[in-house]
Amino acid sequence: MSDRYIDFINSSVGQMLAKNLGLPAPTPLDRFVDDQPVVSGAVLVGAARNGTLVDDIAKFLNNINADTYALFDSEVHAAAAGAGLNIQAYAPSAEDSQKFKAVVFDASGITESEQLQELHSFFSPIMRKLASCNRVIVLGRTPELCDNPLHATAQRALEGFTRALAKEVKKGGTAQTIYVAPDADHLVVSSLRFFISPKSAYVSGQVVRVSATGIEAGEVDWSRPLAGKVALVTGASRGIGEAIADVLARDGAHVICLDIPQQEEDLQRVASRIQGSVLAVDITAHEAPARIAEHCKNAHGGLDIIVHNAGVTRDKMLANMKDPLWNMVININLSSEERINEALLNDDVIRANGRIICVSSISGIAGNAGQTNYATSKAGVIGMVQSMKQPLQARGITINAVAPGFIETQMTAAIPFAIREAGRRMNSMSQGGQPVDVAETIAWYASPASNGLTGNVVRVCGQSLIGA
Ligand SMILES: NC(=O)c1ccc[n+]([C@@H]2O[C@H](COP(=O)([O-])OP(=O)(O)OC[C@H]3O[C@@H](n4cnc5c(N)ncnc54)[C@H](O)[C@@H]3O)[C@@H](O)[C@H]2O)c1
């Protein structure tokens, strides 16, 4: 569904009205198009004293040929020389017209609260130097794994900084925190690539943990990272599922498109467009888990990625909610996913460096009146990710979730107008997301280079005001 308000407010009449009446003025977001560089514009890189991630950041920026700048007195220059990165010295002033598309700051060296001052001294002078649809990434060390309380406290503080900064960057910009575990520095690249690029258009104010999982990735072809992989997407005939199938196929995967038999015609249309295959099954059917496992084994010799996307809402206030509505939502959105995972794992269908990716919802984080059934199911999905992370890691499989906010699909088109408008505007970007925004986030988790990501729940919600 299209958001006509964005088109109108970005016309000359609309801009004048927005200014005079104080209306929200959402920026049209940059989104990825084929053959685009990872980042289109200058990148400013900085580091707090004694940062330990700056070498890997410099190597990454060198590999993507970023047009890189650092402040004159920055420690970054030595790291850049080591990585062969050509870096230009920069001194912000009120007069210069320099704009940065991305800012990457290594805060890993911040070991106590007084040192948080380095965030202020680096960022304050450059806040007016951010380009439209800018990307701010702050890297730190996983607080739970820091070796003393002062260090853990200072690192945990980064989260508040970036969440607040994400509300200040405006112009379609985003800001995130990436916490990196000791021994996981080399695993940060896939997350840097995602968050610096337009692929993360509608993800903001998020916190990601990169862990030393011990899972091997092998060589990664960044242009087709999923070449040779087999992915199964449930609910693939339309909406977010259709976009996930498109993006995973673009990245090289063979996609098995699954949906209910009634949707077979649409499913066929999606599968033929992406040279995928069709599996028309109701995931709640008694025989569904075994059929899915058998199909993956017999037709493809196994499975690399499963995306549990199929989901429904059946909203009613709890006082009016009958058993069938409650049971149906829990069954489709949660219990069937558990049963399918069990069948795939018992039969060893998921291959090494495999992925289980779930679609939760901000409703499962914040709750929503009229959605006790839905919020229960989607919070359960988060519980599944957190509780299965350890046992799966031992089998070389990662599990993560996305939690979409307001995404423009048939599901949200059915919401009454006033509630729909509130859902669209109540986020840092004053607009709804597109199905492709969820799909790109899933493709980032799916990449073989994301072997350091497990147990994460990332919201794709434009930093919605609803929820934490
Ligand atoms: N659209 C949003 O704003 C939003 C926000 C948060 C979360 N989500 C979640 O994203 C996912 C996709 O949502 P969407 O907006 O694309 O919805 P949608 O209704 O457009 O698509 C859902 C798909 O799931 C399929 N499906 C439903 N029950 C099934 C079953 N028993 N077996 C197999 N397939 C089944 C449907 O046929 C449909 O094709 C859902 O899990 C939803 O809860 C959506």
Image (tube, grey):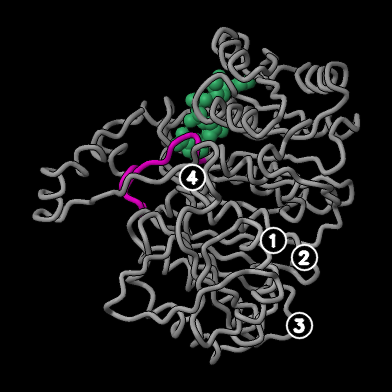
Assign a secondary structure to mark 1.
Answer: helix
The magenta stretch spans which residues? 424-437
Left or right: residue 387 compared with residue 396? left
* Residue beneath disc 2: 184
Q: Nearer the viewer, mark 4 or mark 2?
A: 2
Disc sitting over residue 147 in the figure: 3
Name the residue carrying label 1.
188
Rate crowding at label 1 as few (under 14), some (14 to 19) or many (20 or more) other CA atoms within 10 Å: many
Which residue type does callout 1 highlight?
Val
Q: Quadrant of ligand 1?
A: top right
* Mark 3 or mark 4: whose residue is earlier in sequence: 3
Residue 157 point in image, percent of width and height? 54, 77
Q: Residue at x 74, y 67 (%)?
A: 185
Of the two numbered discs 2 and 3 in the rendering, the one whose residue sits closer to the viewer: 2
Which one is in front, 414 or 18?
A: 18
The Cα atoms of the two marked residues, 4 and 2, are separated by 32 Å
